[in-house]
Image (cartoon, grey):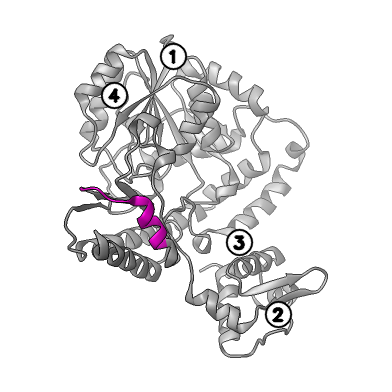
């Protein structure tokens, strides 16, 4: 467990034991740093967490103080359960480990920090990723890999740049990641949708669109899709690739949650691609730190020059410090250790959602909950007022949301709510999901 979490737990225990009292100054950053043998930044991060939960407050040049006990208990009693967020759980992210890697990166790459670096990415990180990607069944050369400032930049570039097929439209699943829809809208890229349901795509419709709609590329999230949590089978991935080859369409594969995959025989689309159609995007936000803003793209040779040109004149180069720290983090073995923890954590959380859904016994709803990942969803099979459900849940400090931002206008369906377990522990999931089903049972 991280020192950051140990500090938070220690302070909570001290408060519950009445060793820290209202209006008394909290332990100093220096004292806690020495007590837990950690950096001062780790202590600051722990106090930031406690401030967000309204347990402590800070006074500049003075320190941290305990919030009034009555107010604190009120906040605790009404703790927010957030099933709407797409961000990972802060308490299990490797802040302290990664801080050590940042410090090492400053020493190793200090000369590079003061100069522009290669737009393609730090060579040391690229070579490390070439080996690292073999764990995902991605076998490529270093020449194929480009580093971007997060997956959002990779999506922006790929959706806006010209492709060798000379076509202009981008096809997207419906619903899909809202960041991709925003990128397409901002870049004024023509976009077409295709519905993706729990039973997959309509492949006849996909073929018609590939054949007739001037599709340059198909943006897809094959596994643990955002926002529904759906995954294609290997056969479905192969079928998409065959159609892409037949109709000269490229594929943008966003594999943002590959690290949570537990099935040994589930491969990315890139693995099945023998015709150089797939551009593979791997983000590190969900398993590492959202603010790191590092992603990698594995490109077919024919796309490399255009992509690099767009990348160079978009930001010149991605942060060398972040790249260097990630390279050290992967090579040290810390990445694999943390990935194992996260796979177990999110599998347990999603299984808790599945258990509660299976016990609900409510007619006219379907629960589509995967074995792991961040997202699942509840589908209402007859008319329902989603906005009223959202308001009723908010009264109980449970945050859910509709999927309006994840759809193109012509596809929006207001009979679905997504359930994200990114920020919610087992106890919160148990309480929050049980309360949601009680609300539904009362008026559905």
Foreground mark, 1 or 3, reads: 1
Which circle's residue, 4 or 2, is located before the other in the chain?
Answer: 2
Q: Which residue is mark 3?
A: 96
- Location of the C terminus (image quadrant): bottom left
* Secondary-structure class at tag 3: helix
Foreground mark, 4 or 1, reads: 1
Q: Which residue is mark 4?
A: 241
CA gap between label 1 and label 3 equals 45 Å
Which circle's residue, 1 or 3, is located before the other in the chain?
Answer: 3
From what the image shows, is residue 422 above or below residue 194? below
CA gap between label 1 and label 2 equals 60 Å
Foreground mark, 4 or 3, reads: 4
Q: Nearer the viewer, residue 390 or 46?
A: 390
Which circle's residue, 4 or 3, is located before the other in the chain?
Answer: 3
Tag count in the figure?
4
Q: Are marks 4 and 1 in contact (CB under 8 Å)?
A: no
Instruction: State whether residue 255 appears in this view.
Output: no
What secondary structure characterizes most of the magenta part? helix
Where residue 293 sits, quadrant-wise, is top right
Q: Which mark is residue 168?
A: 1
Instruction: Give the residues in magenta.
Output: 382-393
CA gap between label 4 and label 2 equals 59 Å
* Secondary-structure class at tag 1: loop
Residue found at the far right of this picture: 61
Residue 133 at x, y percent in the picture: 43, 39
Magenta region includes residue 391: yes
């Amino acid at each position: 467990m991280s020192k950051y979490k140990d500090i938070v737990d220690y302070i909570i225990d001290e408060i519950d034991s009445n060793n820290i009292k209202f209006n008394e100054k909290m332990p100093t950053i220096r004292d806690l740093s020495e007590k837990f043998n950690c950096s001062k930044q780790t202590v600051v991060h722990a106090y930031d967490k406690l401030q967000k939960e309204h347990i402590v407050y800070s006074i500049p040049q003075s320190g941290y103080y305990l919030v009034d006990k009555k107010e604190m208990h009120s906040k605790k009693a009404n703790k927010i359960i957030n099933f709407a967020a797409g961000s990972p759980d802060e308490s299990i992210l490797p802040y302290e480990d990664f801080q050590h890697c940042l410090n090492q990166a400053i020493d190793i790459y200090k000369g590079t920090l003061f100069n522009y670096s290669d737009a393609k990415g730090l060579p040391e990180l690229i070579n490390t990723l070439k080996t690292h990607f073999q764990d995902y069944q991605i076998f490529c050369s270093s020449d194929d890999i480009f580093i971007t400032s997060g997956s959002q930049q990779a999506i922006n570039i790929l959706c806006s740049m010209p492709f060798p097929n000379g076509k202009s439209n981008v096809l997207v699943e419906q619903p899909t990641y809202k960041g991709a829809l925003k990128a397409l809208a901002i870049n004024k890229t023509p976009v077409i949708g295709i519905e993706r349901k729990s039973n997959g795509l309509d492949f006849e419709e996909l073929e018609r669109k590939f054949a007739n709609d001037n599709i340059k590329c198909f943006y897809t999230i094959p596994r643990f899709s955002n926002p529904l949590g759906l995954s294609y089978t290997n056969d479905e991935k192969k079928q998409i690739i065959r159609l892409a080859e037949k109709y000269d369409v490229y594929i943008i594969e966003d594999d943002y949650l590959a690290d949570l995959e537990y099935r040994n025989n589930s491969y990315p689309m890139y693995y099945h691609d023998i015709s150089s159609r797939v551009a593979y995007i791997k983000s590190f936000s969900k398993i590492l730190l959202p603010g790191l803003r590092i992603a990698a793209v594995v490109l077919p040779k024919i796309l490399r020059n255009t992509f690099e040109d767009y990348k160079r004149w978009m930001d010149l180069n991605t942060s060398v410090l972040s790249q260097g720290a990630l390279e050290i983090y992967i090579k040290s073995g810390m990445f694999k250790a943390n990935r194992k923890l996260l796979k177990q954590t999110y599998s347990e959380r999603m299984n808790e959602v599945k258990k509660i859904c299976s016990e609900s016994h409510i007619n006219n709803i379907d629960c589509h909950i995967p074995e792991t990942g961040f997202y699942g969803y509840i589908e209402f099979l007859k008319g329902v007022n989603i906005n009223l459900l959202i308001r009723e849940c908010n009264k109980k400090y449970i945050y859910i949301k509709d999927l309006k931002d994840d759809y193109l206008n012509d596809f929006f369906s207001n009979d679905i709510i997504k359930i994200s377990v990114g920020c919610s522990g087992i106890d919160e999931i148990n309480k929050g999901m049980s309360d949601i089903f009680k609300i539904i049972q009362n008026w559905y």
